[in-house]
């Protein structure tokens, strides 16, 4: 056992961080907010960089890497607040023509809301053409459509007979679990980023003659942000690594599916970290944090959107409980 | 990133499991949790069994009498002993988990030879005399004085909250060898000594905890003579040595308890299914969330251990991140236990209720949560020191 990142993994992560810093910096982010549409050129560049084909075998034109590497790259995308149906397009690589190269934009329907429907070339899941209607999305960088609202796949969580509870329909198939884990990685990146933003601000902003970061009330907010991030990181990385190990053992290509218990726990903790860190980051920024100009609301709104995708908190809690 | 075991590790695990299956049935019945002398005898007997089987001081370096096992083997050991329901380190806690490792890291060859083997054999147990009535979180303001007299220190003062003092043989003691002044800031002038608990001038007065036990005590030191040769590290360099001790205490000492918590959580879920509380969605979901927390805490442990391996064995500040989350999760676990128990939550004869009371100390002992948050903010995040 050696749970640290390998040199190759560190290089991959840093490479993606640099790519995104160059191609999707803060100015680009704000421009995207103002524009509100998907930047197809950027999408193709992400495709060229291997974001979508990362786990596709080399024989099929992919990069041939595994779930742990995908998680690291999605974490970077989360840090940068990269917009678009990243997870669905990544999952569609190899199945939907053009998804791997970023020629196609693919979204997915796993519940009542579908992101980027109007701009998508394809949709994973049910046929939505008829009853989907656009809503005013809380996140300026994630357009949303509302659809029927039923989960598309999967049996119910089994609860003891006679229990009086709402029955949850979970999507426990391979695609959904992988999607949940990659979404958790995006949340992790966002949580780490808002921690950094809060700490930076707390070191610079002065009140009462000293940096606000010298005040314990602020310090403790920041410390809890780090703790949430690190616990989520441990869970997300472990879910990816154990899936990979299980697949190696089975020795079947494409058998790399996260364990439902691991993926659910990772999603739960990463959602929590992303949402609560964004809120604390806003608090540390004071009045400035409440403005449109500060980026923190974009992190919070995106974190809310992602928390509703693939495995929600209620579903994750039930799923983990069912294994106790 | 790799979380799989090597073939060697699996062999180690297999042999350990086999030994545990044979050894555990030979243990005497567990003593009453309030009976400290009984607990000392039980805990040290278990330590002796580990020693005879070659499992004592697994994570200690080989030249300190340990097995020099890899941190991963240590994790496997903690996992399997806990799974098998083996006794926890108990009274051996300080000796095995932080005084011993500190002596191994900072002591002289003679000191290692004198103190370490009896800890490993379960012959001697240690306690920790750091806190004082007016020096808790602000440990560096301690006042117990040591004055040099030839080749002895003469120590006077008092210590408090000393766990297992009643039954300990040795104490890792922090004393002031240089009074605080303009030229001596309070972190300087502290020295780390090993004190015999039966030395003349040592008085131990047990304190009753809210759980009803006397697991800690007050200590009064009246001109206790401690040989200079029992000093670990240089005179006035005790604060640095203390930081080594605390990093062991926070970094690795709680690891085994995560496995214990996961086992307790499984028992809780079973009990809730049996008594019908499982149908309460709110309760069930709380259990699920705690399940995810403890699973992640175990992963964080594996992460921290991998990091410590890189830095040569002394755990880093990641221990504070772990301790913060763990202590709260454990309290939450026993809050839910009380809900599962319903009216039985007020019956002290149920072990969970003792555990619930004990869990109240987790956010205080070994550095309060507030102090841990300061450490995370200042030493990891680099925020300025301040009021
Ligand atoms: C079960 C148990 C076993 C123990 N065993 C031992 C032992 O074996 N040996 C030993 O030496 N000690 C032991 N301790 C002592 C323990 O380390 C101290 O209790 C702890 O460090 C807190 O110190 P204190 O009790 O003096 O509380 P105080 O330091 O007085 O703290 C009181 C409150 O004030 C807060 N506070 C204090 N300073 C700050 C600050 N700067 N910023 C924010 N909040 C602050 C604390 O967080 C706490 O909430 C034990 C304690 C317990 C409960």
Image (cartoon, rainbow, N blue to C red):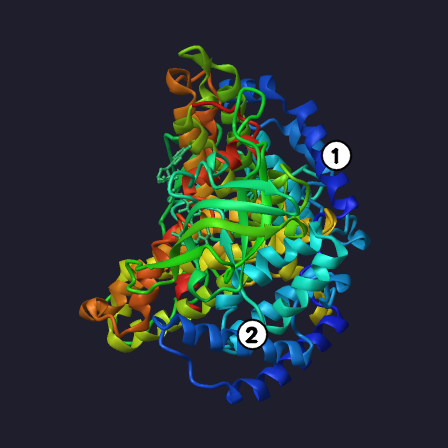
- In which quadrant of the rendered view does residue A132 lie? top left
Q: Are marks 2 and 1 in contact (CB under 8 Å)?
A: no
- Which residue is labeled 1 in the image? A15
Residue plotted at (59% across, 17% down) = A27
Q: Which residue is mark 2?
A: B81
Q: Quadrant of the C terminus of chain B?
A: top left
**Residue B137 visible somewhere in the drawing:** yes
Q: Secondary structure at mark 1?
A: helix
Element under label 2?
helix
Instruction: Where is residue A200? Give x, y as percent.
Output: 54, 22
Displayed-image quarter of ligand 1? top left
Residue at screen point 43% across, 73% down: B39
The subunit carrying tag 2 is: B
The answer to whether dots 2 and 1 both sit on one chain is no
Q: Vertical placement of A262 versus B369: above or below?
A: below
Residue A259 appears in which quarter of the rendering? bottom right
Q: Residues within 10 Å of mark 2 (few under 14, many from 20)?
A: many
Foreground residue among B76 and B96: B96
- The subunit letter for the residue under badge 1 reads A
């Amino acid at each position: 056992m050696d749970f640290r990142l390998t040199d190759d993994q560190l290089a991959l992560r840093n490479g993606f961080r640099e790519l995104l810093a160059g191609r999707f910096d803060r100015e680009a982010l704000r421009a995207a907010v103002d524009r509100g549409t998907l930047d197809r050129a950027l999408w193709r560049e992400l495709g060229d960089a291997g974001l979508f084909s990362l786990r596709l075998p080399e024989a099929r034109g992919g990069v041939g890497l595994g779930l742990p590497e995908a998680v690291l790259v999605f974490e970077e995308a989360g840090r940068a607040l990269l917009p678009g149906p990243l997870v669905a397009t990544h999952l569609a690589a190899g199945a939907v023509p053009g998804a791997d190269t970023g020629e196609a934009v693919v979204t997915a329907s796993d519940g009542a809301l579908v992101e980027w429907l109007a701009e998508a070339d394809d949709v994973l899941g049910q046929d939505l053409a008829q009853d989907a209607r656009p809503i005013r999305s809380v996140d300026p960088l994630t357009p949303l459509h509302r659809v029927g609202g039923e989960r598309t796949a999967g049996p119910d969580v089994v609860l003891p007979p006679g229990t009086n509870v709402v029955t949850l329909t979970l999507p426990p198939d391979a695609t959904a679990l992988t999607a949940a884990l990659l979404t958790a990685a995006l949340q992790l990146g966002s949580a780490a980023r808002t921690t950094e933003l809060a700490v930076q601000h707390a070191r610079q902003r002065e009140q009462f003659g000293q940096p606000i970061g010298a005040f314990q009330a602020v310090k403790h907010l920041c410390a809890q942000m780090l703790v949430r991030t690190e616990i989520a990181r441990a869970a997300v990385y472990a879910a990816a690594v154990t899936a990979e190990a299980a697949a190696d053992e089975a020795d079947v290509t494409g058998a790399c599916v996260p364990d439902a218990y691991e993926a659910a726990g990772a999603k739960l903790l990463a959602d929590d970290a992303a949402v609560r860190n964004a809120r604390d980051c806003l608090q540390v920024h004071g009045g400035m944090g409440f403005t449109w100009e500060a980026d923190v609301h974009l992190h919070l709104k995106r974190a809310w959107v992602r928390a509703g995708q693939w495995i929600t908190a209620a579903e994750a809690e039930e799923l983990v409980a069912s294994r106790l | 990133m790799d979380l799989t075991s090597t073939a060697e590790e699996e062999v180690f695990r297999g042999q350990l499991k086999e030994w545990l299956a044979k050894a555990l049935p030979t243990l005497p019945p567990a003593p009453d949790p309030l009976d400290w002398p009984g607990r000392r005898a039980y805990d040290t007997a278990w330590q002796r069994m580990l020693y005879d089987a070659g499992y004592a001081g697994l994570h200690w370096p080989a030249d300190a009498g340990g097995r020099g096992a890899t941190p991963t083997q240590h994790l496997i050991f903690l996992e399997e002993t806990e799974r098998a329901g083996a006794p926890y380190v108990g009274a051996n806690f300080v000796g095995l988990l932080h005084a011993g490792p500190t002596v191994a890291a900072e002591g002289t060859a003679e000191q290692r030879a004198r103190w370490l083997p009896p800890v490993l054999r379960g012959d001697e147990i240690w306690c920790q005399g750091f806190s004082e009535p007016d020096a808790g979180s602000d440990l560096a303001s301690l006042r117990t004085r040591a004055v040099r007299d030839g080749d002895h220190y003469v120590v006077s003062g008092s210590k408090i909250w000393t766990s297992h003092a009643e039954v300990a043989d040795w104490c890792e003691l922090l004393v002031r060898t240089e009074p605080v002044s303009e030229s001596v800031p309070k972190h300087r002038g502290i020295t780390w000594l090993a004190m015999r608990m039966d030395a003349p001038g040592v008085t131990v007065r047990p304190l009753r905890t809210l759980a009803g036990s006397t697991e800690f005590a007050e200590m009064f030191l009246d001109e206790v003579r401690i040989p200079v040769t029992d000093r670990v590290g240089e005179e006035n360099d005790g604060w640095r040595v203390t930081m080594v001790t605390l990093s062991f205490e926070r970094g690795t000492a709680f690891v085994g308890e995560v496995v214990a918590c996961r086992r307790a959580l499984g028992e809780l879920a079973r009990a809730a299914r049996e008594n019908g509380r499982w149908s309460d969605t709110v309760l069930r979901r709380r259990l699920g969330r705690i399940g995810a927390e403890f699973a992640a805490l175990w992963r964080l442990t594996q992460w921290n251990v991998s990091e410590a391996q890189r830095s040569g064995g002394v755990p880093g500040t990641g221990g504070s991140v772990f301790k913060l989350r763990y202590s709260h999760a454990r309290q939450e676990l026993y809050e839910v236990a009380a809900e599962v128990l319903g009216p039985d939550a007020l019956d002290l004869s149920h072990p969970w209720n003792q555990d619930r009371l004990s869990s109240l100390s987790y956010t205080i002992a070994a550095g309060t949560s507030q102090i841990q948050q300061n450490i995370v903010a200042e030493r990891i995040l680099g925020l300025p020191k301040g009021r």
